[in-house]
Image (spheres, grey):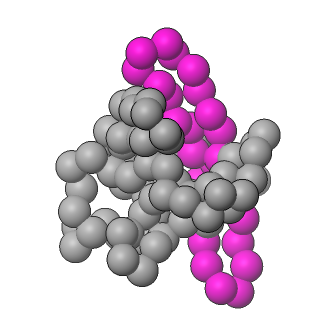
Amino acid sequence: MTNYIEMYRYCDGAIYKFYLVEDEDAVRYRRQDKNIWIIRHPDYGWVIWDETDNSLMSRPWDTPITKQGDQPPQGDWVSKKEKNSFVYKLRYGCKID
């Protein structure tokens, strides 16, 4: 299993890393600098979720929930926070043993 995920923002090249957190409840990834998670939501599938605001921040652009597997889908994701919206590319980082 991949130990981290990168979210690459197309407009400015910013990269955010999310690290794998496994517990008995679920597989999820936590952003290294904030309390923001990539989780599998029962209604929306894989999403980026802000624990502080308890809000949906981002989701896959063209991968329907029925086509999502055990890991967040690679490819384009869209985000919305207040009046701002961005497009990101989710890509898997290296496996760290």
In the image, residue 7 lies in the stretch drawn in magenta = yes
Is residue 79 positioned above or below 28 on the image?
A: above
Left or right of 15: which side holds 24? Answer: right
| Res. 64 visible in picture | yes
List x then y, in percent, for residue 20.
Answer: 68, 58
| Res. 94 visible in picture | no
Q: Nearer the viewer, residue 22 or 85?
A: 85
Is residue 41 positioned above or below 3 on the image?
A: below
Left or right of 53: which side holds 68? Answer: left
Left or right of 78: which side holds 91? Answer: right
Residue extending farthest to the bottom is 24
Q: Residue at x 55, y 60 (%)?
A: 55
List x then y, in percent, for residue 26.
Answer: 61, 79
Position of the N terminus by quadrant: bottom right
List x then y, in percent, for residue 66.
Answer: 22, 73
Give, as a single range, the part of the protein colored magenta.
Answer: 2-27
List x then y, in percent, for residue 86.
Answer: 40, 30
Q: Residue at x 70, y 72 (%)?
A: 22
Q: Quadrant of residue 80?
A: top left
Is residue 8 positioned above or below 91 on the image?
A: above
Q: Residue at x 56, y 38 (%)?
A: 6
